[in-house]
Image: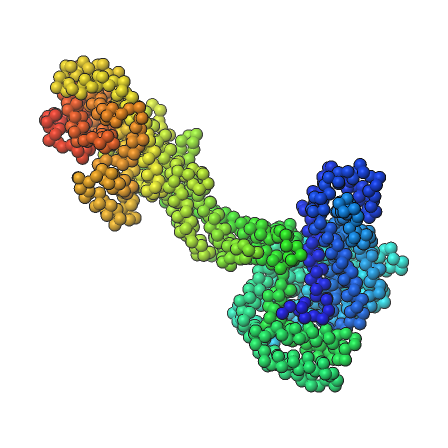
Amino acid sequence: KHVVLQHPEPLCVAMHTGNGLEVRCCACGDPKAKPSYLIDKNLESAVKFIVRKFPAIETRNNNQQLAQLQKEKSEILKNLALYYFTFVDVMEFKMQFKCITKCLFSTMQTVNFDLTKNYLDLVVTYTNLMMLLSRIEERKAIIGLYNYAHEMTHGSSDREYPRLGQMIVDYENPLKKMMEEFVPHGKSLQDALVSLQMVYPRRNLSADQWRNAQLLSLISAPSTMLNPAQSDTMPCEYLSLDTMEKWIVFGFILCHAALSSDPAALSLWKLALQSSSCLCLFRDEVFHIHKSAEDLFVNIRGYNKRVNDIRECKESALSHAGSMHRERRKFLRSALKELATVLADQPGLLGPKALFVFMALSFARDEIIWLLRHADNIQKKSTDDFIDKHIAELIFYMEELRAHVRKYGPVMQRYYVQYLSGFDAVVLNELVQNLSVCPEDESIIMSSFVNTMTSLSVKQGSEPLLFKHSYNAYTSVSKASLGLADHRELGKMMNTIIFHTKMVDSLVEMLVETSDVSIFYSRAFEKMFQQCLELPSQSRYSISFPLLCTHFMSCTHELCPEEVNRSLSLCNMFLDEMAKQARNLITDICTEQCTLSDQLLPKHCAKTISQAVNKKSKKQTGKKGEPEREKPGVESMRKNRLLVTNLDKLHTALSELCFSINYVPNMMVWEHTFTPREYLTSHLEIRFTKSIVGMTMYNQATQEIAKPSELLTSVRAYMTVLQSIENYVQIDITRVFNNVLLQQTQHLDSHGEPTITSLYTNWYLETLLRQVSNGHIAYFPAMKAFVNLPTENELTFNAEEYSDISEMRSLSELLGPYGMKFLSESLMWHISSQVAELKKLVVDNVEVLTQMRTSFDKPDHMAALFKRLTCAVLKRMTIIGVILSFRSLAQEALRDVLSCHIPFLVSSVEDFKDHIPRETDMKVAMNVYELSSAAGLPCEIDPALVVALSSQKSENISPEEEYKIACLLMVFVAVSMPTLASNVMSQYSPAIEGHCNNIHCLAKAINQIAAALFTIHKGSIEDRLKEFLLASSSLLKIGQETDKSTTRNRESVYLLLDMIVQESPFLTMDLLESCFPYVLLRNAYHAVYKQSVSSSA
């Protein structure tokens, strides 16, 4: 199918080889890929010697300098072979080029577009290649090192070395050498270049001339919109202006005599010199036209006028070329926008107006490449002309046109298949019939050509293309009986037909030919990208930069398969920066919305209520000049539509940028798939995570943290903004929420950073509960909250504002069941450490406690034994009770939250828990309790506490001994309770339904610790609690005490027994009555309530 295989001349093969060698030379000249031997200190003297003597070889008298080469010769041969044979291939290509120019083009006719174009391309490729070779600074060192290593290994120089060394020396100044070489071929090259006089000036027009001609406009003449776009020189219409300028500049440097003999040649030369200051040799290697041409011509006798022409053109290029190209880009932006819009609405027009599309792509590509090349390489320039903040828009419309061609390719193919068979075949047949002379061979070719076109289908579309190339080559040589030079109408028709066949077979190749923008001027390109992001009106086109990275796939070559393409990192950088910019805009919007949401918090309404009350009571407060506070919602009131707030600007900028991110679902660069939306999702996840943690405002130094309700309000405001992003770009924001919020329910996130779960757990344990232990805060059961107690040193926070039911519900919303489970586990760890200390106290007093356990009915003996106990146990039990009370609040809040979110599931779990048969195995029951606890339901036996205390089992103590310690612990607590009566803070307060020193929390501690311990030791919880009540009957003795200091709060302590029974699922009031008369409890309640009324009065 390929032209290369069917062409009768090796021209295309030579072009392909030349392009590959350009890639290889570029790779060899890369400073980052410099061979290590050239910078090896041990070889430095040898390398200098070789370069100084190059290309001569002297090995006899320089053993000392070349001794190190002897050690490294095999490695040098291995590692420098690729470089060396690249230079050998360049030499072979030079010989091939000379053979082609000598054999074919001495009689070439320029009416054949393809042969003329390929010939000029080959000349420029050859020129580029020799100049690239001369720019490889280490070429002599590489070739010399390889040859010396070869001689030391094989005993003789490489057979290619003499010719290669001489070529390197001859082409030190490549243009000067090639000017001498091209003297015999000057006429054929001149003819080919002068054939551009009807094409190049017509392409190199100003923007005003394009605008007056309404170039590329489909709607300027509506009546002809469906007419096919035609031209006598179809392939020349989309021919690259940059390519033509390289032909003209390099061509007339090589055949410079034509500038003096042919006015047309001089006119083309001057026009090209005035259009650009530098040309692209290959990729980012440039050729400074005026300086190089002046250096060449200044030493030629009689060329003073040419030198003056160059200097005049240089001044003109510096003064006017920038503004001319700027205006062209401005025109092309509007022209391509119109073209893309019309074709998007009416894709059927891609058939008749395909030529316009490829012309537009070629024109735009030339202007983009020109700007990047000059912005990166020209020092003296007007900044306005070389900084185009709207270049992204032009690239974007190019990509839209490319997308239309790819999407509607079948439409174009069907159109041109019918065009070729229904029109082109008929016209061509008439032209052939009207030929005055048509030899037999040509007649056979043309008849076959017409027949094939007539019966053409999409699958056969490549055949006319092959016929055409073969026929063109056949009729273009001087000995052909039927020459195209004598039948120009036939040549024009053939050029038109080949364009139509390309529309059938080679749409992808046409896109590469006309719109490939493989950018190697990365510095200027990245700068333009940053300018695009900074300008809100252009940010919607920023996707065009990563889309250009897909073009790099067409610029590599099989002769350099190891080339590492920079487009992957460039595409990644562009998409990452776009996502970062969008993330920053979203963050700013979230900050604004969080501020507005904060204004609606209840704490801000106090002043408004106060003003309303004062106004009602006609009290004048505050200063007269004090401004009235704006109420929430004022920001939404607009006096006119022109008023734009900061939030409006942010939303506008975000919508523009999100259009770009959402433009394509994914893009392929090499074997990698890039998904722009995933970049945004990833950045949103990271920023959302940091924002949530940041909004806690946790200060480790001052132990300050945001209230859970305020954090929840801010998080909801943040999530509302993120949900609105789905209106701009098609991303699954729910996935972001799931990933981020689920991580926040764990101790650490995926990056190992603290989460709100760890921060709040740490704060409640280390700050709030520690202050409770210090006596600064008390738990008020009536309020279901912890409340600050009046002390000398006021706390920096109000405990009630962090522990009431609304705050705990907010905490449950934020942490979720997983986070609350972690909080519970952390609380249980603290309880287990307290229990461990309690066990130590029991062990220290084990003998006394053992005796007391058998002396409950001997009050005097019990009193004597009690005095022998060495330490009080109730403080640690109170701490445990406080922690369990806090956990109870947290569990209740979790249950309330889950009942709102998943009521049916919670009710099912609750029903399951409530109907566990008593005879159920304890392991099964504990599994049910664990499920229930995770849902916030209270359980008879706390599974988390059981797990925490189970981990304390000591290997040195037998289970029987552990069980005994647990029993003695309960006895220790029971017999210690009378000591509470002497404490001033032990007074019961009916208002709070508890004691200010938190001893009411003992009820919860005793019940849950007993249940957990005797579940672990497989004992009877009921029996052990009965024993506890018997031991607690020692409270009766304080009724007989006469010392008021020891009995001041006797009634308040009596109430603890009632609380313990009320709290316990295992004890009953009948059992308490058998140990402690109920009348005492009744009198105690009466006394404390009476005392409360009298103290309040």
Figure quadrant of the C terminus: top left
Q: Position of residue 264 (x, y in %)?
A: 80, 68
Quadrant hosting residue 220 = bottom right
The residue at 54%/71% (across/down) is: 410
Does the image show residue 788? Answer: no
Depicted 205 relative to depicted 444: above or below: above
The residue at 70%/76% (across/down) is: 471
Depicted 139 relative to depicted 1097: above or below: below
Image-based side of 31 in relation to 1054, left or right = right
Image-based side of 809 in relation to 696, left or right = left
The residue at 60%/60% (across/down) is: 394
Quadrant hosting residue 232 = bottom right
Image-based side of 1054 in relation to 195, left or right = left
Question: Is 167 in front, or is 172?
Answer: 167
Q: Where is residue 1060 in the image (x, y as percent from the top left)?
A: 19, 30
Q: Position of residue 16 (x, y in %)?
A: 69, 62
